[in-house]
Image (tube, rainbow, N blue to C red):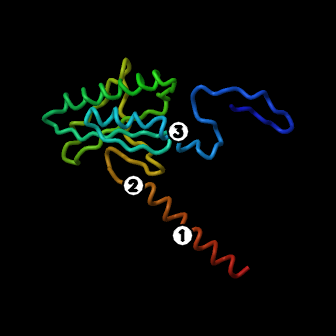
Amino acid sequence: MQSVEIGDETWEPIRLARGVPQGSVLGPSLFSLNVAPIEDIIKSYGLNCAVYADNTQLYISIDKSVLQSGISNLQICIDAIPEWLADNELVCNKSKTDVIQLSSQFQKDDLLSEITIGKSNVVLASSVCDLGATLDCHECTCYEKLSKISSRTIYNRKSSRCNQFV
């Protein structure tokens, strides 16, 4: 049972058939258990993944000699995920979906421009943000993020020195 309480007003409790109550102590653990099968689906297609809260990232290493079959396998896996989500009354936010191809500096001319996922073509991004770090398909470095961190560190050190003399 769950109810909504705002100030002094409380709404009638309703029984939840699915989902995880927001704000509960067990919420994050229950959510992780609820979406754990997604990882099994991804691995069943031979892909790797990283899951952090409601963020799931797929990784695949494709040799140039089997590029088309690797992309096809990726597409089939990506099609299976929304299907599982729909069966479990969950939704994938396609506007937050990014695709990037990282490759060797010696194969820059072989980069794809788009990939078909489901019924739509997705243009590959030149850079994506991954938990605060920017991955760039051309540079494959985290220079921008490291620059921001180091500039903040220098600023904080200068600020703490000024505070000592005030």
Looking at the image, residue 110 sits to the left or right of residue 40; the answer is left
Rounded to the nearest angstrom, the CA distance separating label 1 from label 2 is 18 Å
Q: Residue at x 50, y 61 (%)?
A: 149
Looking at the rendered structure, the secondary structure element under dot 3 is helix
- Residue 9 place in picture, x, y as percent: 85, 33
User: In this rendering, which labeled residue sits more in front, label 2 or label 3?
Assistant: 3
Between residues 5 and 126, which one lies in front from this camera angle? 5
User: In this rendering, which labeled residue sits more in front, label 1 or label 3?
Assistant: 3
Mark 1 and mark 3 in contact? Answer it, CB < 8 Å: no
Q: Residue at x 48, y 25 (%)?
A: 88
- Residue 74 place in picture, x, y as percent: 29, 30
**Residue wearing tag 1:** 154
Between residues 117 and 33, which one lies in front from this camera angle? 33
Q: Specify the farthest residue to the top.
A: 119
Q: Quadrant of the N terminus?
A: top right
Rounded to the nearest angstrom, the CA distance separating label 1 from label 3 is 39 Å
**Residue wearing tag 3:** 31
Q: Of callouts 1 and 2, which one flags the residue occurring earlier in the amino acid sequence?
A: 2
Marking on residue 66: none
Crowding near pointer 3: few (<14 within 10 Å), some, many (20+)? some
* Circle 2: residue type: Cys
Looking at the rendered structure, the secondary structure element under dot 1 is helix
Between residues 119 and 136, which one lies in front from this camera angle? 119
**Residue wearing tag 2:** 142
* Circle 3: residue type: Phe
Q: Quarter-wise, where is residue 15 in the image?
A: top right
Mark 1 and mark 2 in contact? Answer it, CB < 8 Å: no
